[in-house]
Amino acid sequence: MQKILISILMVFALLCGAASAWAGTTDLVNALGPGDFKAREQAIAALAASGDPAAVPVLDALDAGKLYMRKADKVVFIIKDDADPATLIDPATGQDAGTAPKATLEKVKVNNALRGVISSAKGGLTLFSPDVATRKAAAANILKAGDASAVDTLEKAIAAEKDPSALALMKQAFAAAVLNSSRPDADKLAAIETLKEVGDRDTAALLAQVANSAEEPVKSAAAAAAASIQSGLASWTLVQNFWYGISLGSVLLLAAIGLAITFGVMGIINMAHGELVMVGAYTAYVTQQVVTAYIPGAADYALLISVPSAFIVTGLLGMAIERTIIRFLYGRPLETLLATFGLSLVLQQAVRSLFGPTNKDVSAPSWMAGSIDITNGLSLTMNRIVIVAFTAVIFFGLMLLMKRSPIGLQMRAVTQNRPMARAMGIKAAWVDTLTFGLGSGIAGLAGVALTQIDNVSPNLGQNYIIDSFLVVVFGGVGNLWGTLAGAMALGIANKFLEPFAGAVLGKIIILICVILFIQKRPRGLFAIKGRWVES
């Protein structure tokens, strides 16, 4: 009996405490109504200091212009919509509080300065959210802003936090807030040591700002910490540029590897190669539309389904081009160039007539979204990682096909010594068709990959045709290893030149370097014998 009475008393005490808290919050919310902007800022600060998460919807409503004061009794409400009479919502409970004519209400106005105060206040209040992700997001916002008014709230939140990752982020946010506060120098020196371990660009900027405005010894410590972070970031920037170069080289390799077969091995100047890449990209778009419409549950795998689809479509298209146009122009490179250039215009116009001139969107699947943070200065996006892996699979798969399969052997035999291959009973004409179809199919695969980093439009192929020829010529005509080396060399050089010379000037410098290089080594980095070389 005694235990029951104690339990009842405890529940009663909790209810009284909650009621008291609600009453306190209601008074703070009502204080937002009257007075000028200065008084309203003080009311927002008091609301933030309460630490009551129930104040967040009130601040959201204030920011959105949906907080109104009833003129008769100065009580503040949230209005549900813009209807007249307005539907009122009690800010403390979120319950319906009846209706009132708009004429009896006065809007609680805000200006840009108050919006900044509201944003900081919401960041502090959400530190007590039951959701860990929300608390971490609030701490991250304070860390980025270095809001000094959040110091006391952060201290309470740190004392109550149980999640280790959220606690670490709150301590970093607390350090950033302390640096901008009026706390003693000892606290600020300890905060600098905490922020030094964070080591990202935002923290370096915050420390540099403190170093410019603070006095000794905080000034020297902040400057030294900022310099240390910048030094570490510079090293990671080199690594990041190298990775960007690898990913750009993978894109160039994807676009050029099909051309390495048709141009490098067969000696056909195929100006329509870029349009075959474009057809592959549109195949991915159509596949995604069909899968989303008829098999919604498999929408996340539409991009995977489009890989064989694009290879088959562009491969068959390439075989048709070889049988109807190319086979009549072997040994006549200028006529081949003109014919394929005309074909590229036809393909562009056909796609423009079917799908329109505007860009099409191929959505990234969920498994390609986001990025992987290696350190604070190095982050790798998933789509680039997948493209690099996809390129590696295609490259080594093609190498195996050319070196280990019967059709690969016949392709090499026909391209290196056509009369001897014919004498051995190889049907050279069909091998030519299959070789051109293989190169065209790989161009289609490149189109699928490019949908994740570029716009799908009728002009897609034009953006890569020059780079593709540049890679094949620089790497060595007819050599897949040379194509790989050429693509990676040009991709990495491009990414290291861009920060200093800009994108356009960087490409011009690379083009000049390649021209000078070709003067010394006309057959590129790696040269082999083939029909093109022999002719």
Image (cartoon, grey):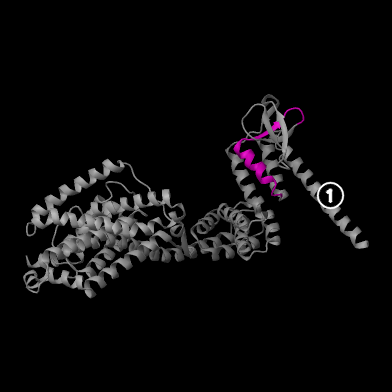
Residue depicted at x 25% and y 51%: 461
Taking 379 as reference, is 484 left or right?
left
The residue at which mark 1 appears reads as 16
**Picture quarter containing residue 262?**
bottom left
Crowd tier of the residue under label 1, counting other residues whose Cα lies within 10 Å: few below 14, some 14–19, many 20 or above: few
Q: Quadrant of the C terminus?
A: bottom left
Residue depicted at x 25% and y 56%: 314
Residue 513 visible within the image? no
Q: Quadrant of the N terminus?
A: bottom right
What SS does tag 1 mark? helix
Q: Nearer the viewer, residue 212 or 377?
A: 377
Residue 485 point in image, percent of width and height: 25, 68
Residue 439 point in image, percent of width and height: 22, 61
Q: Nearer the viewer, residue 244 or 291?
A: 291
Residue furthest to the right in view is: 1
Residue depicted at x 22% and y 74%: 403
Q: Nearer the viewer, residue 6 or 290?
A: 290
Taking 112 as reference, is 159 left or right?
right
User: Where does the magenta region start and end?
Assistant: 52-73
Residue depicted at x 25% and y 59%: 441
User: Does 66 appear above or below 365?
Assistant: above
Amino acid marked by disc 1: Cys
**Picture quarter containing residue 443?**
bottom left
Q: Is residue 29 magenta?
A: no
Residue 378 point in image, percent of width and height: 44, 63
Residue 16 visible within the image? yes
Q: Is residue 58 magenta?
A: yes
